Each structure stands twice: as C-alpha cells, then as structure tokens.
Image (tube, rainbow, N blue to C red):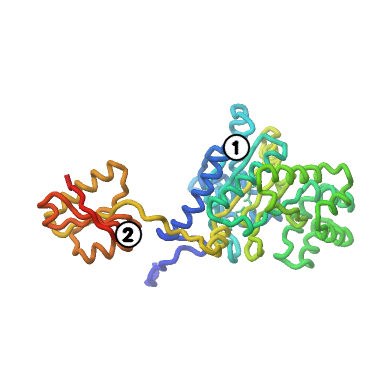
Amino acid sequence: MSNEPLSFEPPRGMRDFYPEDMAWRNRVFDAWRQAATIGGFAPYDACVVENLELLQRKAGEEVSEQIYAFEDKSGRKLALRPEMTPTLARMIAARQGQLQFPVKWFTIAQCFRYERMTRGRKREHYQWNLDIVGEDRVTAEAEILAAAARALREMGMPDDAYRIRVNNRALLGELLQKLGVAAPHHAAVFLALDKRGKISDEEIAQLLATAGVPPEVAAKAFEMLAIQSLDQAAAVAGPDSPAIAQLRELFTLAELHGFADRLIFDMAVIRGLTYYTGIVFEAFDTARKFRAIFGGGRYDSLLTTIGGAPTPAVGLGFGDVVVLEVLREQPGVSATLARDGAIIGFMLPEQRDAAIRLATRLRAEGTRVDLGLAPQKPKQFFARAGASACLSAIFLGPDDVAKGSARLKNLETREEREIALG
Ligand code: HAM
C-alpha cells in the first residue's frame, strides 16, 4: 500500500450516481419501463457476469475486443457482459420447448465495454433491451420502434429532436452480390464499412483487403453507400428485392404506429455487430452532434449460432448516456421533481417522541416523510426543509406538543395551517 491518499474518483469510465444524477437516470428508466409495459413487453433479468465463451465471437467485431474478462478462483473464464443479446439468446435457448412464441421481453441491463472514451461513450452504461423473439414479420420491427418512440416522448424528447435511420443488411447483401462480393465476405465488409467516419477510408480499404476483398470491389462497396433513397436502392436491387419490400412495409407500418415522421432510410446504417441479418436501425439526434441514441435490428441466426433451434428475432439496445446528453440540451426539460411528502423536525429532546409518532402515522397513510433524527433550531430545520424535495414542513416545539397541535407549512405556497398531533 502506498501512502498516497486514495482517489475519490470512480475508476475511469465508470460513473457514480448522486441523488441529483438519479433524478435524471430515473426519468429515463421510468420512461423505458412505462413504454415497454404499455407495449406488452414482460420484464426479465440476468446476472452481469456471463460465460466468456458465449460472448466471444469472430474477430473484427469491436465489442468482442472490449470485453472485461477475468477468471474466477476455479479458473472459469467469465466476463462482465458488454451487451445483453447473447444472454437473452442463451435464456431463450434454455427454455425453447416451454416458451410461448413470440416472446416479447425487456430489461434494463448494466453493460461494460473497455472503450476508448469519447463523448457519449463510457466503460459502463445501462442499456434498455427490448426484443421480440419468434416472429419473422416486419410487424415485430415496427412494434419495437414504436416502443422506442414512445419511451422518447415519455422522457420529454421532442419528436423533431431525433431521427430513426433504417437499412437492411439483406439489401446490402443483395447489392454486394451484384457487385461480385461473395457471401462469405459480407460480414467482414459490413464490419469494415460500419467503421466509416471513425477511421479513414484508406484504413477501411485496408481492412477490406485483409478480408479478401479486392480494391476495385471495395471501391464499389463505397459507391453503394452513396445511395440516397429507397427508390434509388430499389433501382439497383431490382423490382423483386425482398429486402426492399421489407423496408417499404416498415414505412407503411410506421404510419400506422405514428412514428413515420421520424423514420429515414439510410444506406450508411450497417451496425457493428455480426449477428444482424435483416433490417437494422439507429437513432440519432437530428443535428447529428452525438453518437447513436439507440441501435438494433433483426438477428434471425443468433439462436442457431449458440446451439438453439432456428428462431427469428429482432430487438434494440438503448443506452442511458447519449439520450441524457441530448435530453439535457432540450429547452424546458429538467429533472426536478414536483415537491411531495413532508419533512418533520423537533426543537428539543422532549418533542422527539411526538415527532416519531406523527411520522409513523403519516407513513402508515402512505405519505413520504423525512423525519429529523436530532433536535434542531427552527432556522436550521427550515433551511433543510427548503432545500428538500418535500411539499410540507412540520416543526414541533415545546408549545405545540403541550397543546396537541402543530403548524404545517406548505413549502411551495408558504401557507400555514394547524394540524392535530393526536
Ligand atoms: P449497440 O449498438 O452496441 O447494440 O449498443 C446499443 C446502444 O447502447 C447504443 O446505441 C448506445 O446507446 C448504448 N451504448 C453502447 N455502448 C456504449 C458505451 N460504451 N457507452 C454508452 N452507451 C453505450 C447492442 O448492444 C445490441 N446488443 C442491441 C440489440 C438488442 N440488438 C438486438 N437486441
């Protein structure tokens, strides 16, 4: 042990949540839970520690290189989960025979990734996961995105503050095929193209070359990303592209669900995880100042990859970090709660018992009470009461207890009224 004083900072990339931070966090968590529950999703949970083997996948994927891995005392290879989806797939696979499909589940999972720290990226974050397993129709994508839009509204995000950008990995696959890129190379191409904007195009070309993609095909892959609209994509993919049909259907369903004004086709949305097979999406603030607010898509092969029966699935991960940054920038959005409940104090040790009795009675009625623990001077008490989140303040002095009543002060209106202590 060194003699250096211990740092009061949490480990780099990890966060402490003081009560004022919790007010913001709860605003987001409450909206997530509300939107999921209203949408008919059931809650589930799992341990933060997961088997490393389940989480490790092919090289090239950013998350698999960011895993906090360790061995326990028996030499088991474990990890702090970087995301929830493999765990969800494992839980579904374990009960595949018993579950009633489609399964609609949600959770708020703390996830850990050893990331290079940038704005909106921490080494730990909470992620709302919303998944539908066992449905291959686009109605599932629409249901997931409608819930996300509901959550954003619930937390106070204006509709025009964000956009949901969608694409289809199957469309990218169809186009790559037309460009002459063989199917086994597609995953590597997706991962490389997803790094656009994060690394230089030369470095991406290098990655593509390593994946066995010749330079002239890589150039065509870049060209493909320049496609601006669904109609343009349809012109290249051909009239009976199933991928285009799915995207068109999603736009139709978005109208019905009421979030079509926020939905945009974007060829550059690829996603950095290998398991996506179909429609993929990412939401960004409209000004594109921040990283993705949420991301997700269809992953129809993950269940079989981990040894389960073939089961289609679609879902999203929605982190707490970026959305809070965007939310705090919105005019008029704050996390201060309405005052509620009562704060009770007493002046001398002789009034303590009466204060406790009053608090006990009010708490039994369901009122939130912040009860003073030691005698206080009135000035001290009212200073604390003013700074608290309580709506009313009751201070017991010797006279009050003697006459069996006390003054209740409304901290918002400053009005006072007499209440009986009995
Ligand atoms: P992801 O895009 O890696 O997807 O993460 C989803 C969201 O989690 C991001 O859009 C962001 O809000 C948040 N997030 C991710 N990493 C960090 C970080 N280091 N710091 C802060 N926030 C972060 C997935 O994880 C998929 N498993 C989502 C999914 C669920 N797909 C299907 N079902």
**Residue furthest toward the top?**
98
Against 318, residue 200 (above or below) is below
Residue 323 marker: none
Badge 1 marks a residue whose secondary structure is strand
Determine the image quadrant of residue 94. top right
Q: Quadrant of the C terminus?
A: top left
| SS class, disc 2 | loop
| 146 relative to 18 in the view: left or right | right
Instruction: Give the label on residue 104, or none.
Output: 1
Horizontal and vertical percent position of residue 396: 17, 56
Comparing marks 1 and 2, which lies closer to the viewer?
Answer: 2
For this rendering, which residue is in front, 415 or 377?
415
The answer as to whether callout 2 falls within 8 Å of ligand 1 is: no
Residue at the spot x=10%, y=52% of the render?
Answer: 402
- The answer to whether residue 54 is seen in the rendering is no
The residues tagged by marks 1 and 2 sit, at their Cα atoms, a distance apart of: 46 Å
How far from the left and from the top, in percent, is residue 298?
70, 44
Whether residue 290 is visible: yes
Seen at 51% across and 62% down, the residue is 332
Give residue 383's quadrant in the image. bottom left
Q: Mark 2 points at which residue?
A: 413
Instruction: Decide which of 146, 78 is in the foreground and name it.
Output: 146
Contact, mark 1 vs mark 2 (Cβ under 8 Å) = no
> Which numbered disc flags the more N-terminal residue, 1 or 2?
1
Say which amino acid is labelled 1.
Lys
Residue placed most toward the observer, 377 or 296: 377
Number of residues whose C-alpha sits closer than 10 Å to that of mark 2, classed few (under 14), some (14–19) or many (20 or more): few
**In this picture, residue 54 sits left or right of residue 337:** right
Q: Which of 91 and 343 is in front in this view?
A: 343
